[in-house]
Amino acid sequence: MIHDELQKLEKLATKIKGRMAELKSENEELKKLNSDLEGQLQAKEQEIEHFKNKIKISNIVDNRRMNSDDSTEMKDLIDNYIKEIDHLITHLSE
């Protein structure tokens, strides 16, 4: 009788060990997924900030009063700066 109870407890302990190993593995996978998603979120937040800055710069240029030649030149200059910054960000992201 005690022997049977011990066998049942050993089987239960074995099952628990197996389940714990499964849960540990699942936990590690979820941690990795969470880390990957946090990285993606951070990258998206940086993209959003970058686009916000583009919009702010465009609004500044649009609201600034100047003759059309100066305005066009300023927009081209800022667009070139933005392209250069985009290129640098892409290069740094790699």
Image (cartoon, rainbow, N blue to C red):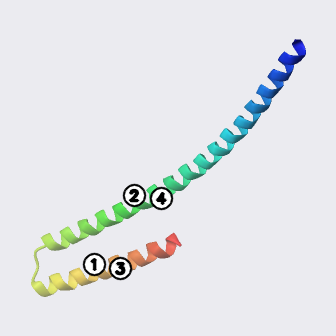
Q: Nearer the viewer, mark 4 or mark 1?
A: 4
CA gap, disc 3 to disc 4?
Answer: 23 Å
In the rendering, at what x and y percent does residue 1 appear? Answer: 87, 12
Q: Which residue is mark 4?
A: 40
* Sequence-first tag of 2 and 1: 2
Answer whether labels 3 and 4 touch (C-beta < 8 Å): no
Q: Which residue is mark 1?
A: 78
Identified by mark 2, the residue type is Glu
Identified by mark 3, the residue type is Lys
In the rendering, at what x and y percent does residue 48 appear? Answer: 34, 61
| Quarter of the image where one finds residue 23 | top right
* Sequence-first tag of 3 and 1: 1
Count residues near mark 3 (Cα–Cα under 10 Å), then give few for <14, some for 14-19, many for 20+.
Answer: few
Answer whether labels 2 and 3 touch (C-beta < 8 Å): no
Q: Which residue is mark 3?
A: 83
* Sequence-first tag of 3 and 4: 4
For the point 22% across and 81% down, which residue is it?
74
Identified by mark 4, the residue type is Gln
